[in-house]
Amino acid sequence: MVNGIRHWINGQSADGTSGRYGQVTNPATGSVTGQVPLASVDEVDTAVGAAAKAYDSWSTSSLAKRTQVLFKYRELLDAHRDEIAALITAEHGKVHSDALGEVARGLEIVELACGIPQLLKGQSSTQVSSRVDVESIRQPVGVVASITPFNFPAMVPLWMFPLAIACGNTVVLKPSEKDPSATQRLVELAAEAGLPDGVLNLVHGDKVAVDRLLTHPDVAAVSFVGSTPIARYVQQTAVAHGKRVQALAGAKNHMLVLPDADLDQAADAAVSAAYGSAGERCMAVSVVVAVDPIGDELVGRIAERARVLTIGPGDQETSEMGPLVTAEHREKVASYVPLAREQGAEVVVDGTELTVPGHEDGFFLGVSLLDKVTPEMDAYADEIFGPVLCVVRASDYREAVELINSSRWGNGTAIFTRDGGAARRFQLEVEAGMVGVNVPIPVPVGYHSFGGWKESLFGDHHIYGADGVHFYTRGKVITTRWPDPSDGGVDLGFTQNS
């Protein structure tokens, strides 16, 4: 059993003292590989105290010093990306190529943070009135809590803390207790890059640690990614304690396929977007809306591709999809397939009986494809967060958009069509924060911001990009008026002839 999972507080590794531990498993084998300490309130307080102490010097450090650390950090992450990806595969289960892609997307935000001198430039207006100038600047908010999910143990932390510390804040990071090792490695590398003690701290934990971060008086802001019920709880609790919050939540992402679309392209996109990373991502396509008359043909092409996916351990090169993260989650996801059949859906592909030879104790689940799903069915109404794809039929474009907009979530959506006018209309009419046109998973690049609408976001700011900078800083406006030397009251020190 691996026992190297520890807290990181004030620049050094720290054993847990609460006496409480959680188990870390390898989802491909079902075996326990380590124990993660679950922080007590006192341990969280120690981490917050270290961050608060470090804030005084870090918040006033030069942009040159911050960027020097961040450039070094980017170099170290790039050198260790394969190691980090292996840790993700071992504890989350996703295939190694997916894990490498996750690290690469996180690196984008580190690169964005390296440009913080440009991102923090203020604005000024001269002579707004007689001898009066006005300047707008942005300053850090203080100690930031980052609470991150199991499905992206490297990418989501990298979406948060590099930009937060670039802005001059200090951070207490609480990763998922299900797969903590990759996140811990990110923090160790930040220290190796020269980040001063206390600027970035890590506490492992469960609800005890989360609740203390949400209520601690020295925490100024909270960044969170997770399910909708927990995001709502995080936002309400933290706001009640005077904190600013960005809480990114769940989704039910729809992919609209119009009759003129390239059906092979659409089918390829649906399979990769629905089943990649075993469907355990908030931007996964979980509903395909097929507009008549192409429904049968599209479903057939998706099924053809889904049936030949190679499912196996994430560290095998031939695997295209790995296991789910826990046995409990596997059983929950699998339960939606027979229930959908009972409620009237057509189960075109049933992956619930899949076994992987030699890995019978792993948390593997095959892919499932459900056709003729209606909004009343549980498989449509719930965020399944697994490899189950629903197909809903629509008679025309208008009915399809009304269906999508009636969802309580509004994270991401996509349209597949050859018609530029239809695509333009869709991107303006659809109620979602991120839209793809012939792109199934429209995750923005680092210099744009990521975030949804409706119950996919609690708070006013999206993550990273310009929104991220604004979230991690406060605006200040300075108005100045100085006497002019011509008033006669200022001696400029020039020599004068007698």
Image: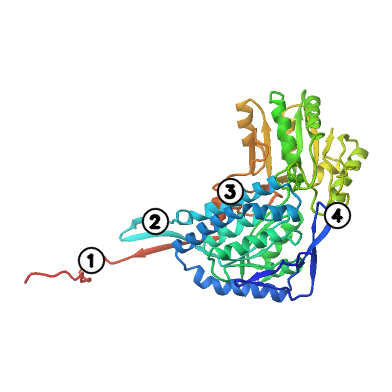
Q: Secondary structure at mark 2?
A: strand
Query: In which quarter of the view is residue 316 placed?
Result: top right
* Mark 4 and mark 2: Cα distance apart in space: 56 Å
Q: Position of residue 256 (x, y in %)?
A: 71, 33
Check residue 188 in the rendering and tell me which mark sits there, or answer none. Answer: none
CB within 8 Å, label 4 to label 1:
no
Q: Residues within 10 Å of mark 1 (few under 14, many from 20)?
A: few
Can you identify the residue that label 1 sits on?
A: 485
Quadrant the C terminus occupies: bottom left
CB within 8 Å, label 1 to label 3:
no
Q: Residues within 10 Å of mark 3 (few under 14, many from 20)?
A: many
Q: Residues within 10 Å of mark 4 (few under 14, many from 20)?
A: few
Residue at image coords 72%, 32% = 268
Residue at image coords 72%, 55% = 226
Most extreme residue toward the right is: 342
The label nearer to you, 2 versus 3, is 3
Can you identify the residue that label 4 sits on?
A: 328
Can you identify the residue that label 3 sits on?
A: 449
* Mark 2 and mark 3: Cα distance apart in space: 25 Å
The label nearer to you, 1 versus 3, is 3
State whether residue 332 is above or below residue 264. Answer: below
The kind of residue tagged 4 is: Glu
The kind of residue tagged 3 is: Ser
Query: In which quarter of the view is residue 261 placed?
Result: top right
